[in-house]
Image: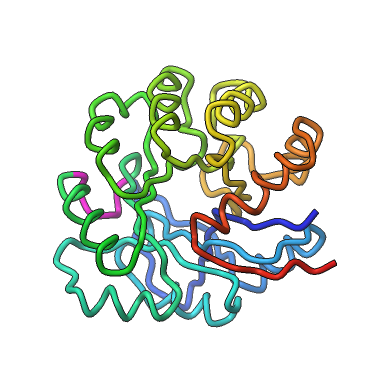
Amino acid sequence: MQLFDAHFHIIDHHFALIANQSYLPEEFTVDDYLNRVKPLSIIGGAVVSGSFQAFDQTYLVHALRRLGPYFVGVTQLPATSNNEEIIQLNKQGIRGIRFNIKRGGSETISHLKDMAYRIYDLAQWHVELYVDSSDLSELTEVIFRLPAVSIDHLGLTKKGLPYLFKLVEKGVKVKASGFGRVDFEVIDVLKKVAAINPDALMFGTDLPSTRAPEPFNNTDIVLILDSFDESMAKKILMTNALDFYKLEIKEVS
């Protein structure tokens, strides 16, 4: 089955990195990524800016040029970014912004609402949140009102799952990624989210799995294929993300 990788990182040491909590990742270039996923039938994906990349756009634009038209970017932007900058980034393949609440490196959460509406009105972009779901209780009412949102890595913690499920009921998307980062039984949560909203889950490798206790393994995909029927597996592994990122990809037989 063909896959869309809705969450991975490119780390190119030719571009500036900023230590986050004293952490700097090892290099993971476009070539490294393509070699790693060669056996996986990946036809497109979303490059997501990490905390250590802050507001740098140059690495992301460069990566998207290398990867091709079926790959998009999710960046981090300061609230001071003007409309023309956003429009130009949209032309270069950026499709959303990330608020890294867990680790920092992005704009502060106080700007979430205003920025979410501005980028949606300008370019139909969405917001992606890297947040421990146990912190969602304070954000739920704000998130309910945003035009388009996704939550990274299944929300990370068991404690916050009730808040995550409530958001899924309201149309919030969830990255089926970072299985080695969570403290619960992955398949149980995947099935619960899919039952609430079959359009919610979007698979991502999370490569190169920076700071993850357990990195991505190809068996993460097998888990999805073995746990859902073909129609639902296809939604999780490809079509839900294509719809969210507004991409049309002709499947290769």
Identify the residue at the far right of this view. Answer: 253
Q: In this rendering, is residue 122 above or below 166?
A: below
Q: Residue at coordinates 46% horizontally, 66% vertically from top-left?
A: 73
Q: Residue at coordinates 42% horizontally, 17% vertically from top-left?
A: 159
Task: Determine whether, in the image, residue 57 is placed left or right of residue 203.
Answer: left
Span colored in magenta: 104-109
Q: In this rendering, is residue 8 above or below 235?
A: below
Q: Quadrant of residue 16?
A: bottom left
Q: Quadrant of residue 182?
A: top right
Quadrant for the C terminus, please: bottom right
Q: Nearer the viewer, residue 115 or 38?
A: 115
How far from the left and from the top, in percent, is residue 246? 50, 63
- Prevailing SS of the magenta stretch: loop
- Total numbered badges shown on the rendered structure: 0
Reply yes or no: does residue 108 show up in magenta.
yes
Q: In this rendering, is residue 12 above or below 45?
A: below
Reply yes or no: does residue 214 show up in magenta.
no
How far from the left and from the top, in percent, is residue 80? 14, 66
